[in-house]
Image: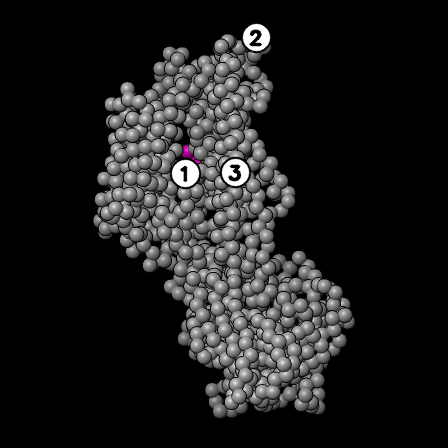
């Protein structure tokens, strides 16, 4: 894009005040020194930036993958698999996609939608790409046309710049060579201008003119060195300025407090390290019934896990009366959602002694498993033998089964299916909703660099999904919207009890090769079950 | 001591022109290159304010890069033909750089073409590294614009050399035609100079000194260069008239074509191409400069420049300040003044949409800024006079 108009948005970079431009920006300058911007590890959503979602656009069920760009503005790659549920399934003739801010005035004005490309080999597979122009909370709206009319599905996309890229050596050499040619060209042009330009046709330069030309060329050389130096300073300034927009998650400090009356408690203090000015810490909203979902996972074997729900006691401060916890060092992953629909996962570590605390109540739950065997893991590769079992015996005699275990290439979308069996090994007949859903899962890489809290609707936050769904409402009730989301079957309007399935499907794709542990939680009766399965992701096919 | 070339081994004919009275094709080609980029640049900004999304192959991009291609064709021909075929008249009116021979302007324009080509992969990498920059003044864009600037300057110098030689040869008609082309290029250079300052001269910024400082840096240089080198008593007036007509034509023509946003966030419902802002009333200081310089021909350059600084800035402020007030009123909300056109990403709360000045200045703050602008205009003019006088004598 040779030129583009300066724009300002309420979501992205801030409008520059008039006259705030550096003097350097007002001068004609260029630079040839290649600054190799160092890659910054992506921390947004703890190493799992791709979005996997399962939802219904009217009568059409879609499995969506959105791969957000590394830098913003940038291009998000989008894939849709129209799920074929049998011969009677509605046929999709086309899908259109549009990027829209999730909230605010611009959410009311979508740009022109783009058609997705339908695969010639697989009519159920569609691909597309969209520009995401500003950091913040976005949605991709899918408008589906097919045999049963139109349907709409909106998938929230939290867009952040996660790093800057370095320059390839070949490109650096090419640009450096061209830059040297340009510098030499300026010196040569200045010399010729001083020596020959004013000579009448046919005349040759005098010795004096030649001497003048050498002096001018020396001056040009000094000028070009200064210009290159100045360009270097400018480039570095631009790179530093851009680095300010690279996503910085809220920081979280975890403190253990002992009170003689109330027992041991956990205090979480949240602070903003500086990112977008529009981000606040006092605007958190409920996400499936809680302001915060906190996973406690013991390192290094991931043999103990807790799913807890601290209460907000002040903006940026959460507190939780601790349950009984074995001693150890724990990784803490806290999921929160802002009023804009932008989700964040805050990370902390805490070393605890043995905690004799309260019993687990409400939606709080824990799980125990064998430690992940580090001997089976070698860096980012792992053997198939890592997957030692596809069923997990639960403390009350029930069993959870992973329906489709196997090694998957990284970045490959799949619906991970799990079933709950009763003490007799039969499908559990008393399955209940856990925080409104058939199941929850946390996908955690063995080295702690990946953590993803996944629901039957995918990796998107439920609060953001509800915001997006509300915008698509055309007379349907909230209950209808929720019922359209997989695994969120709502009780029927009548008083007749609805029997829930004993299986749950969780859309996800491993972000990188390596060993993972999947903590899966389902509920039956009043019991919340937590199972752990080990998974191995192979290197990506791409 | 100057001597004459030994032309015994040179090709006798100059195939660059059909006759001594005609303008050679490579000059037309270079003029077309500058025209193409001037249209392409404004078209491209309009594209990004109206549609948003683009590819390398948009018509606007093609118009921009056609500048480099046309410059490469014309100047590449000149360099290679003059160096290797050695036609007598062309060699005699050429300069030598690193063993190659061509008119000085051809080398400058070639440099511009290489700079434009270099900017393309640089810009592409920049977008991959830091995201698509939503501003004009970035390092790769500046390299591109330096390239365009060099093509313009190279064309100007080629025209000057030809004009000066025609005049010395007594070919007044050819010299006159070349002078018209030179003034036309001068006008397009004003267009491009103001394009580069677009981010600082938006109409909502015109009640602050920064806009006038931005114009005072460099614009008087171009005025003085054109006035000194073109030998036209009304060089600045002609050049700014071309700028005014060019911009107003864009204001009137671009909205005739449909367009709709293909990127979000969309704050404005756009149905057609969004044109640039109404041109700055540069024609007023241009007339003032022409009048001043016509009556101060015998003055020392520094004294002329000293008088020019305040005249340039104050004459511009005197008309642009109240005109900016007018642009904020409903009376200007029509197709001619174009104050009702807003790009799709402009929030309804932006100063532009609200038609309010950004941080308007007054009192000492304003006068300090304008004093700085006058200083810039003085220095710019001094530089321009020196450059223009040197260019006036260019023969090659």
Q: Secondary structure at mark 1?
A: helix
Label 1 is found on which chain of the structure? B
Q: Which residue is mark 1?
A: B39
Q: Is residue A413 magenta?
A: no
- Residue in view at x 68 percent, y 73 percent: A300
Q: Nearer the viewer, residue A398 or B47?
A: A398
- Residue in view at x 28 percent, y 22 percent: B299
Please state if B201 lies on the left or on the right of A163 as rendered.
Answer: left
- Crowding near the residue tagged with mark 3, few <14, some 14–19, many ≥20 C-alpha atoms within 10 Å: some
User: Residue pushed farthest front?
Assistant: A260
Distance from the alpha carbon under mark 1 to that under mark 3: 30 Å
Magenta highlight: main SS: helix
Q: Position of residue A506 (x, y in %)?
A: 61, 74
Q: Secondary structure at mark 2?
A: loop
Examine the rendered structure and indicate whether residue B54 appears above or below residue A156.
Answer: above
Q: Position of residue B10 (x, y in %)?
A: 56, 12
Q: Is residue B36 magenta?
A: yes
Q: Position of residue A400 (x, y in %)?
A: 67, 82
Examine the rendered structure and indicate whether residue B105 appears above or below residue A531.
Answer: above
- Residue in view at x 40 percent, y 12 percent: B169
- Residue in view at x 43 percent, y 43 percent: A25
Quadrant including the C terminus of chain A? bottom right
Distance from the alpha carbon under mark 2 to that under mark 1: 45 Å
Label 3 is found on which chain of the structure? A
- Crowding near the residue tagged with mark 2, few <14, some 14–19, many ≥20 C-alpha atoms within 10 Å: few
Q: Which residue is mark 3?
A: A228
Examine the rendered structure and indicate whether residue A234 appears above or below residue A8.
Answer: above
Q: Which residue is mark 2?
A: B8
Where are the magenta residues, as a range?
Answer: B35-39
Please state if A377 lies on the left or on the right of A469 as rendered.
Answer: right
- Crowding near the residue tagged with mark 1, few <14, some 14–19, many ≥20 C-alpha atoms within 10 Å: some
């Amino acid at each position: 894009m040779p030129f583009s108009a300066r724009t300002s948005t309420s979501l992205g970079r801030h409008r520059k005040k008039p006259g705030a431009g550096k003097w350097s920006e007002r001068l004609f300058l260029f630079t040839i020194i290649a600054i190799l911007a160092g890659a910054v590890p992506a921390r947004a959503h703890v190493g799992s930036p791709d979005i996997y979602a399962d939802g219904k656009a009217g009568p059409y069920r879609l499995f969506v993958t959105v791969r957000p760009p590394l830098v913003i503005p940038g291009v998000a790659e989008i894939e849709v698999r129209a799920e074929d549920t049998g011969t009677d399934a509605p046929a999709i003739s086309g899908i259109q996609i549009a990027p829209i801010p999730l909230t605010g005035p611009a959410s009311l004005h979508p740009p022109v939608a783009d058609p997705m490309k339908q695969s010639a080999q697989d009519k159920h597979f569609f691909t597309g790409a969209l520009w995401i122009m500003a950091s913040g909370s976005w949605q991709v709206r899918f408008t589906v046309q097919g045999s049963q009319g139109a349907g709409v599905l909106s998938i929230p996309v939290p867009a952040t710049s996660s790093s800057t890229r370095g320059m390839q050596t070949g490109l650096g050499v090419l640009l450096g060579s061209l830059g040297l040619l340009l510098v030499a060209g300026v010196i040569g042009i200045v010399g010729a201008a001083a020596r020959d330009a004013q000579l009448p046709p046919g005349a040759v330069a005098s010795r004096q003119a030649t001497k003048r030309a050498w002096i001018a060329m020396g001056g040009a050389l000094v000028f070009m060195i200064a210009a290159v130096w100045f360009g270097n300073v400018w480039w570095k300034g631009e790179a530093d300025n851009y680095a300010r927009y690279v996503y910085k998650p809220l920081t979280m400090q975890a403190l253990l407090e002992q009170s003689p009356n109330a027992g041991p408690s956990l205090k979480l203090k949240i602070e903003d390290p500086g990112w977008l000015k529009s981000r606040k810490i006092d605007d958190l909203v409920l996400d499936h019934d809680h302001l915060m979902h906190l996973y406690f996972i013991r390192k290094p074997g991931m043999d103990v896990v807790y799913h807890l729900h601290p209460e907000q006691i002040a903006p940026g401060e959460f507190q939780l009366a601790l349950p009984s916890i074995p001693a150890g060092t724990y990784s803490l992953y806290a999921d929160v959602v802002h009023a804009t629909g932008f989700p964040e996962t805050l990370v902390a570590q805490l070393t605890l002694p043995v905690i004799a605390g309260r019993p687990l109540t409400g939606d709080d739950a824990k799980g125990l498993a064998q430690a992940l065997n580090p001997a089976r893991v070698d860096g980012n590769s792992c053997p198939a033998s890592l997957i030692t079992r596809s069923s997990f015996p639960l403390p009350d005699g029930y069993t959870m089964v992973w329906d489709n275990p196997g090694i998957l290439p990284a970045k490959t979308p799949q619906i991970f299916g799990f079933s709950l069996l009763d003490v007799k090994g039969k499908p559990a007949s008393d399955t209940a909703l856990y925080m409104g859903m058939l199941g929850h899962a946390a996908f955690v890489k063995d080295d702690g660099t990946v953590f993803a809290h996944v629901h039957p609707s995918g990796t998107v936050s439920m609060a953001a999904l509800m915001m997006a769904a509300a915008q698509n409402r055309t007379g349907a009730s909230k209950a209808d919207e929720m019922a359209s989301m997989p695994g969120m079957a709502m009780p029927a309007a009548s008083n007749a009890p609805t029997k829930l399935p004993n299986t749950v499907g969780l859309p996800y794709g491993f972000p990188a090769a390596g060993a993972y542990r999947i903590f899966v939680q389902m509920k039956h009766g009043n019991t919340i079950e937590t199972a752990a399965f080990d998974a191995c992701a192979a290197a990506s096919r791409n | 001591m100057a001597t004459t070339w030994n032309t015994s081994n040179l090709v006798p004919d100059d195939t660059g022109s059909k006759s001594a009275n005609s303008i050679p094709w490579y000059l037309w080609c270079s003029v077309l290159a500058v025209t193409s980029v001037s249209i392409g640049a404004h078209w491209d900004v309009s594209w990004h304010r109206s549609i948003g999304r683009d590819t390398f192959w948009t018509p606007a991009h093609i118009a921009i890069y056609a500048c480099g291609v046309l410059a490469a064709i014309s100047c590449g021909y000149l360099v290679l033909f003059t160096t290797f075929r050695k036609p007598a008249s062309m060699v005699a009116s050429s300069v030598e750089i690193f063993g190659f021979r061509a008119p000085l302007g051809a080398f400058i324009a070639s440099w511009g073409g290489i700079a434009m080509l270099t900017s393309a992969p640089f810009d592409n990498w920049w977008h991959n590294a830091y995201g698509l920059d939503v501003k004009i003044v970035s390092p790769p864009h500046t390299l591109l614009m330096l390239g365009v600037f060099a093509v313009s300057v190279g064309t100007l110098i080629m025209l000057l050399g030809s004009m000066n030689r025609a005049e010395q040869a007594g070919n007044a008609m050819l010299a006159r035609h070349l002078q018209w082309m030179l003034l036309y290029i001068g006008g397009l250079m004003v267009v491009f100079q103001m394009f580069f300052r677009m981010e600082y001269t938006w109409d909502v910024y015109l009640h602050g000194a920064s806009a006038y400082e931005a114009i005072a840096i460099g614009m008087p240089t171009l005025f003085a260069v054109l006035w000194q080198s073109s030998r036209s008593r009304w060089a600045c007036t002609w050049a700014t008239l071309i700028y005014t007509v060019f911009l107003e034509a864009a204001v009137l023509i671009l909205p005739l074509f449909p367009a709709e946003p293909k990127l979000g966030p969309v704050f404005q419902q756009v149905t057609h191409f969004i044109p640039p802002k109404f041109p700055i009333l540069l024609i007023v200081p241009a007339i003032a400069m022409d009048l001043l310089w016509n009556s101060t021909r015998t003055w020392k350059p520094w004294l002329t420049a000293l008088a020019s600084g305040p005249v340039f800035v104050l004459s511009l402020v005197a008309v642009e300040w109240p005109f900016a007030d007018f642009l904020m009123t409903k009376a200007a909300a029509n197709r001619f003044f174009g104050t009702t056109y807003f790009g799709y990403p402009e929030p309804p709360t932006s100063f532009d949409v609200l038609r309010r000045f950004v941080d308007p200045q007054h009192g000492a703050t304003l006068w300090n800024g304008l004093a700085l602008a006058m200083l810039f205009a003085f220095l710019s003019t001094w530089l321009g006079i020196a450059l223009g006088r040197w260019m006036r004598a260019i023969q090659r």
